Amino acid sequence: MYIIMKIDKKQAILQAALEEFYQKGYEGASTNRITKEAGVSKGILFHYFSDKRTLYLTLVDECMNHYYRTLNSNLTDLSDDLFEALEQLSKIKINLFKSDPMMYGFISHAFMAMPEELKSELELKQRRMQTDSVPLLASRIDRSRFRSGIKPEEAIEFVLLSLEALITKRLSKLREEKLNGNEIAVVMDTSPYLDMLRYGIYRKEEN
């Protein structure tokens, strides 16, 4: 019973922190409001999390882990065609954002407008998300579809970086707006661009 109560208190703090950080951002968030919403004392909060910085980064990790768990549970039906797989993953991400708009609104804002004092840690976490995707896709795709001389890992990295740059640019235009998960899901729909990356934008001239 004691262990369950400890878990419940920690989860209550994380849930209250999610709402506070989502609404107020890192700088504007108050541990006083978090403890009040969670129904715990400040002593309890700082027992689990040494400071606001640790609480924020733990929450980012929790959201990322939830994202990875959900993603991994959907990988069994992933296409062996790179672009079909990317479209499937895009739809999974969009559904995730719609399923919990606050959680994914928070994580998007965390990476889109990184608090200065947490920038190095968040950039490291962001790079982990990027680098994990290449081997994940490379292990599942049909390499025979690539043109001769094309290295699949390099091609995957190129496509992922192109899509990431596109999403970042679209989100940066909306940085000052408090988008929820549903609105961010619309921004993250990359299906029209996958078609361009797959087939190119010029007609191939016949010699």
Image: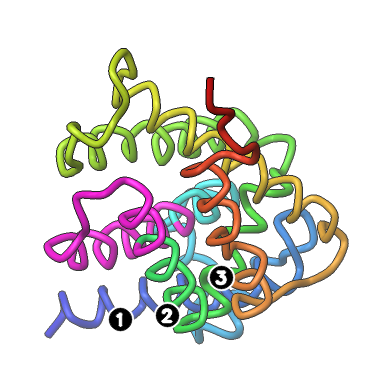
Q: Give the range drawn in magenta.
A: 59-88
Q: How far apart are marks 1 and 3 (CA)?
A: 14 Å
Report the front residue among 202 and 23.
202
Look at 73% across and 48% down and name the residue there: 113
Image quadrant in which you'd find residue 189? bottom right
Q: How crowded is mark 3: few (under 14 residues within 10 Å), some or many (20 or more)?
A: many
Q: Is the magenta stretch mostly helix, strand or loop?
A: helix
- Residue 128, picture quadrant: top left
**Which image quarter holds the N terminus?**
bottom left
Q: Within 10 angstroms of label 2, few (less than 14), some, or many (20 or more) residues?
A: some
Residue in the picture at 51% in, 51% down = 194
Query: Is 78 a magenta residue?
Result: yes
Which of the two marks, 1 or 3, is nearer to us in this view?
A: 3
Instruction: Kindly identify the amino acid type of the residue bearing the numbered disc 1.
Output: Asp
Question: Circle 3 is placed at which residue position?
Answer: 17
Q: Position of residue 24 (x, y in %)?
A: 76, 68
Residue 12 to residue 136: above or below? below
- Kindly identify which numbered label has been placed on residue 12: 2
Q: Are marks 2 and 3 in contact (CB under 8 Å)?
A: no
Residue 46 point in image, percent of width and height:
48, 58
Kindly indicate the quadrant of the structure image that contains residue 170: bottom right
Q: Earlier in the sequence, mark 1 or mark 3?
A: 1
Which secondary structure lies at badge 3?
Answer: helix
Q: Which residue is drawn at 58% across and 85% down?
A: 37
